[in-house]
């Protein structure tokens, strides 16, 4: 619970309950229609993923309907060439996409915090070395590397998540480093140092909380990016074959594009809405937490 | 060129060399991490026993790993990437033969989306919060989230299947023997949808960037001064603000070559465009590792070179850049 102190003379009457207050940044977040819309999109898709087996029971990889049937009352989004329900695929596919997106963002953010933290805290040759390494990873053509790894070692979800997690971090590292370099000179950090706060404590208590909003924004952009790369790999037939994924559904749709538009339209729409939703949320968090933008009105 | 700029360029070039080495080392590690005998990855299986023995000796596969790396580097700089499993020809030959269609697709798309994006950004920045501005913003939002392969399918559905305006796939009509101008028209008709597909992301990026930059520049003192001394608004925008606002666009154009390659690969598969992407796709189906590695090296090299060129061009365009 957040404790609200009232200042400036206003006090609550005896027994009256303080109105429930949300943190300021979340109010600023919800004030933006685009951010709220994004959040609604993400929540809807998450619910769809969570309750996929309830909403459309049965194995989405096994078809029991007529093949290539256009959307109807029994199959709302139609069926594919093997009689598999497209709606079932879309809902179950959300699981893969969300899992990949979130797992990659978590791994890459952790890596980025380590690399960027070391570079920003120590400076000097540590900084130089870390930044050259970061540059190399950033310039590696990620998608092509993923293609090679997937075709050599198989495109299991674990491989995809690891590879993307270990290649998405440079933006986080650079961001954190830049933040640390500017925070280092700020008075509260100098003061904390002066009273002898240890380096780890300085990082976790004073520096990271201030750099956190930017990192969260970046992480949510990585969710969208990772979802798109996974879809691209699955579209090339290099994804994990044991799960339905939107990319593999679009791959299936490719030869039937002139016969069955629904096989392409719905999985693609789900993909687009998810990525747009995540990006809108990221934008919203950025607007709500960036002190430079706060109060200046929305752009 | 000022001595500072020269030193900066030299330092960036040196860095580029190290980055290229890094990419080659990554490639080399992949060869050794992969399951199976590295010789098939280095040499392909398009040779007889004598050829394999020669390749084994050449890459020193019985020697220490550091020696192997050195030998591999030497081969790479001489453009030797082994034989393609599927084509039975040197990887470099196979790749070079398929490069022109991809470069055509990427070049046209990069040029069109940059020009259109800067124009859209300019127009919307001057009409902020208008209906046009808002719809372009929504468009860029969609452009960001739109996977190229789905965009391509939608365009095919609409413009080829429904309306029949453009061909569904390919680079030219094989049933016709067009000559001269007719052939060019045929090529352009085949080019339209792939270019539109590939341009989407880039267009969104450049529009957003130009718009933000323009709004920032137009609010600055020098723009106000230009207004105050009676210059027409259009002139202030194009002659004064735009020149500063497009600087970041340069970094996106050059820094996004990797994304463009990725987009091109996916686009080519949708439209059966006979370029590198198609080649890559077939290579994954055939497990043609030497070819995959060759393409990876090529793309990696292009990305690094484009990056360095971008940095140098930027430093040259913007004298405020500190060469640190």
Image: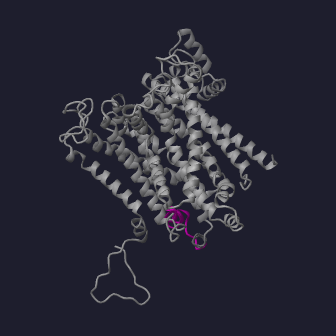
> Magenta region's main secondary structure?
helix
Q: Residue at x 74, y 47 (%)?
A: B8
What colour scheme governs how the chains and residues are painted in the rendered image of this protein? one colour
Residue A198 magenta: yes
Residue A243 appears in the figure = no
Quarter residue A95 falls in: top left
Q: Is residue A236 above or below residue B236?
A: above
Q: Nearer the viewer, residue B193 or B29?
A: B193
Q: Nearer the viewer, residue B122 or B55?
A: B122
The residues colored magenta run A194-212
Q: Quadrant of the N terminus of chain A?
A: bottom left
Residue B12 appears in the figure = yes
* x then y, percent, for residue A64: 18, 33
Give the total number of marks visible in the rendering.
0
* x then y, percent, for residue A280: 43, 56
Q: Is residue B14 above or below residue A11?
A: above
Q: Is residue A120 left or right of residue A100?
A: right
Q: Is residue A107 left or right of residue B53?
A: left
Residue A248 magenta: no
Q: Residue at x 64, y 28 (%)?
A: B73
Q: Residue at x 65, y 50 (%)?
A: A128
* x then y, percent, for residue A202: 54, 66
Q: Nearer the viewer, residue A260 or B57?
A: A260
* x then y, percent, for residue A165: 46, 45
Q: Is residue B274 above or below residue A263?
A: above
């Amino acid at each position: 619970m957040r404790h609200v102190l009232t200042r400036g003379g206003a006090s609550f009457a005896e027994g009256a309950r303080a109105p429930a207050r949300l943190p300021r940044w979340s109010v600023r977040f919800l004030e933006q229609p685009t951010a709220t819309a994004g959040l609604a999109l993400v929540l809807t898709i998450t619910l769809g993923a969570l309750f996929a087996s309830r909403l459309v029971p049965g194995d989405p990889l096994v078809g029991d309907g007529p093949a290539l049937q256009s959307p109807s009352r029994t199959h709302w989004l139609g069926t594919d060439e093997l009689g598999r329900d497209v709606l079932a695929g879309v809902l179950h596919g959300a699981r893969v996409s969300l899992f990949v997106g979130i797992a990659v963002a978590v791994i890459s953010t952790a890596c980025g915090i380590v690399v960027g933290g070391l570079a920003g805290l120590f400076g000097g040759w540590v900084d130089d070395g870390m930044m050259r390494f970061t540059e190399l990873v950033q310039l590696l053509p990620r998608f092509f590397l993923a293609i090679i790894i997937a075709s050599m070692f198989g495109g299991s979800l674990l491989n995809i998540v690891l590879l993307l997690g270990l290649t998405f971090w440079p933006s986080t590292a650079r961001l954190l480093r830049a933040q640390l370099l500017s925070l280092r000179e700020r008075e509260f950090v100098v003061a904390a140092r002066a009273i002898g706060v240890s380096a780890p404590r300085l990082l976790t208590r004073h520096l990271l909380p201030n750099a956190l909003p930017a990192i969260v924004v970046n992480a949510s952009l990585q969710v969208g990016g990772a979802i798109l790369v996974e879809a691209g790999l699955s579209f090339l037939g290099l994804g994990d074959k044991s799960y339905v994924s939107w990319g593999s559904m679009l791959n299936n749709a490719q030869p039937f594009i002139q016969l069955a538009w629904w096989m392409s339209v719905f999985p693609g729409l789900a993909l687009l809405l998810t990525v747009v939703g995540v990006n809108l949320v990221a934008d919203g968090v950025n607007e709500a937490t960036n002190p430079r933008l706060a109060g200046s009105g929305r752009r | 060129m000022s001595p500072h700029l020269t030193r900066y360029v030299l330092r960036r070039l040196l860095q580029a060399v190290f980055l290229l080495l890094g990419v080659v080392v990554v490639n080399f590690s992949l060869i050794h991490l992969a399951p199976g005998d590295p010789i098939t990855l280095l040499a392909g299986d398009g040779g007889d026993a004598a050829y394999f023995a020669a390749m084994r000796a050449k890459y020193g596969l019985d020697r220490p790993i550091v020696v192997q790396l050195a030998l591999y580097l030497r081969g790479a700089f001489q453009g030797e990437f082994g034989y393609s499993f599927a084509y039975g020809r040197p990887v470099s030959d196979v790749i070079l033969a398929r490069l022109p269609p991809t470069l055509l697709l990427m070049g046209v798309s990069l040029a069109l989306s940059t020009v259109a994006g800067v124009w859209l950004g300019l127009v919307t920045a001057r009409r902020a919060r208008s209906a046009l501005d808002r719809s372009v913003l929504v468009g860029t939002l969609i452009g960001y989230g739109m996977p190229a392969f789905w965009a391509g399918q939608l365009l095919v559905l609409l413009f080829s299947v429904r309306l029949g305006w453009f061909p569904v796939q390919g680079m030219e009509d094989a049933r016709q023997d067009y000559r001269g101008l007719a052939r060019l028209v045929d090529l352009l008709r085949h080019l339209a949808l792939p270019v539109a597909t590939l341009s989407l992301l880039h267009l969104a990026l450049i529009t957003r960037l130009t718009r933000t930059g323009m709004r920032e520049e137009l609010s600055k003192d020098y723009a106000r001064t230009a207004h105050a001394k009676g210059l027409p608004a259009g002139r202030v925008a194009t002659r004064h603000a735009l020149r500063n606002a497009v600087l970041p666009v340069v970094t996106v154009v050059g820094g996004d070559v990797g994304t463009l390659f990725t987009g091109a690969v996916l686009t080519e598969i949708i439209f059966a465009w006979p370029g590198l992407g198609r080649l890559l796709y077939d290579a994954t189906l055939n497990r043609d590792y030497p070819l995959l590695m060759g393409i990876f090296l090529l793309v990696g090299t292009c990305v690094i070179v484009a990056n360095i060129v971008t940095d140098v061009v930027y430093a040259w365009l913007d004298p405020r850049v500190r060469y640190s």
